[in-house]
Image: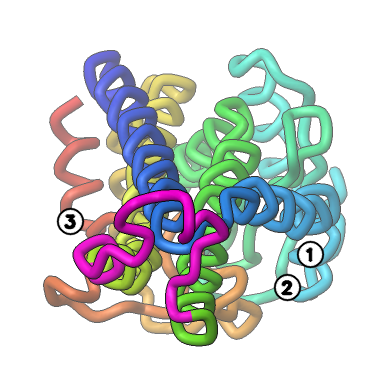
């Protein structure tokens, strides 16, 4: 279990380092091809500003979109008690607890930090899970909160957004400006065709690679939450059994959409198999998650 946690942490950090390397290389190519060295800092500012709103208000937006309502002690006693107990075990404040009236079993956590966190489950999850399975799901979501996953993924989103912006501006400048440089008269090779070709290819491929890395980070964080959630409950089989039940449940989650699907413990949009779908999925294959949990 501890080895799984350590491995997932290092792989997440490595993926972010690759992100930064791609962004740096793209910024260098942009400057070499156009001479506009100020574009990269501007793209970072635009991406950061665009992420601030979603960072501070994402919980309200998601709860509204999901038509969630606050849980109460009388109606959802076991859920509330489980959340309170696992929050104590995790050493974080008790998150706000919400319920979605939907028969499909699922759950998610959101919020910018443990002090402003929300944990939301469907009524179907409470109805179809036994005690240890529900605790396994709650432990997984508590791990997301404890690990500041919303903040971490916000950083990844900023990096991905910056790469997309720089790539788009590079292609536009090459199209409209023909790769002009402000120093064309002073520097040799101002319109080096090799640099131009490399810059164009990089501008086309970089957003695709950035998206793949962003999704890979998301999948890695799911593995990490599985491992750390099991560490909180001390019973990996509970979460493994819950994931199998959620994945095999035939009912669609009507409250979910493409904007919120990545938040849930299991993708409610029911992605099909295949290499491409696996690459562009926000969640790891359920079979692999269960296998790792069974081996802990």
Q: Are marks 1 and 2 in contact (CB under 8 Å)?
A: yes
Q: Residue 118, percent across and down?
A: 75, 46
At label 3, counting other C-alpha atoms closer than 10 Å, the crowd grade (few under 14, some 14-19, many 20 or more) is few
Distance, label 1 to label 3, CA atoms, is: 29 Å
Q: Which residues are magenta?
A: 178-197
Front residue of 8 and 75: 8
Q: Residues within 10 Å of mark 2 (few under 14, many from 20)?
A: many
- Answer yes or no: is residue 264 visible: no
As for residue 207 lying within the magenta part, the answer is no
In the rendering, at what x and y percent does residue 67 appear? 79, 74
Q: Residue sitting at 63 percent across and 34 percent down?
A: 145
Q: Residue at x 37, y 54 (%)?
A: 29
- Where is residue 233? Give x, y as percent: 45, 25
Q: Which residue is mark 3?
A: 287
In the picture, which quadrant includes the C terminus? Answer: top left
Q: Position of residue 50 (x, y in %)?
A: 75, 59
Query: Mark 1 — residue?
Result: 63
- CB atoms at circles 1 and 3 under 8 Å apart? no
């Amino acid at each position: 279990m501890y080895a799984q946690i350590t491995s997932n942490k290092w792989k997440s950090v490595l993926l972010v380092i690759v992100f930064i390397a791609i962004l740096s290389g793209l910024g260098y190519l942009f400057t070499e091809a156009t001479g506009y060295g100020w574009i990269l800092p501007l793209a970072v500012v635009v991406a950061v500003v665009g992420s601030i709103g979603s960072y501070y208000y994402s919980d309200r937006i998601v709860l509204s979109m999901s038509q969630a309502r606050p849980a109460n002690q009388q109606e959802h006693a076991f859920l509330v008690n489980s959340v309170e107990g696992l929050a104590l075990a995790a050493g974080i404040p008790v998150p706000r607890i919400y319920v979605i009236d939907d028969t499909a079993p699922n759950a998610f956590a959101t919020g910018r930090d443990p002090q402003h966190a929300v944990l939301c489950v469907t009524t179907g999850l409470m109805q179809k899970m036994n005690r240890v399975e529900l605790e396994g799901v709650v432990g997984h979501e508590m791990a997301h909160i404890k690990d500041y996953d919303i903040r971490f993924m916000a950083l990844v989103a900023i990096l991905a957004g910056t790469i997309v912006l720089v790539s788009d501006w590079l292609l536009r400048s090459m199209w409209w400006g023909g790769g002009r440089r402000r120093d064309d008269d002073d520097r040799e090779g101002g319109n080096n065709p090799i640099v131009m070709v490399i810059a164009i290819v990089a501008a086309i491929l970089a957003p695709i690679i950035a998206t793949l890395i962003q999704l890979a980070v998301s999948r890695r964080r799911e593995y990490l939450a599985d491992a750390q959630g099991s560490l909180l409950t001390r019973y990996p089989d509970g979460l493994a059994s819950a994931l199998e039940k959620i994945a095999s449940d035939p009912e669609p989650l009507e409250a979910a959409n493409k904007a919120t699907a990545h938040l849930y413990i299991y993708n409610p949009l029911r992605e099909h198999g295949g290499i491409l779908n696996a690459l562009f999925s926000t969640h790891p294959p359920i079979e692999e998650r269960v296998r790792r949990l069974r081996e802990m």
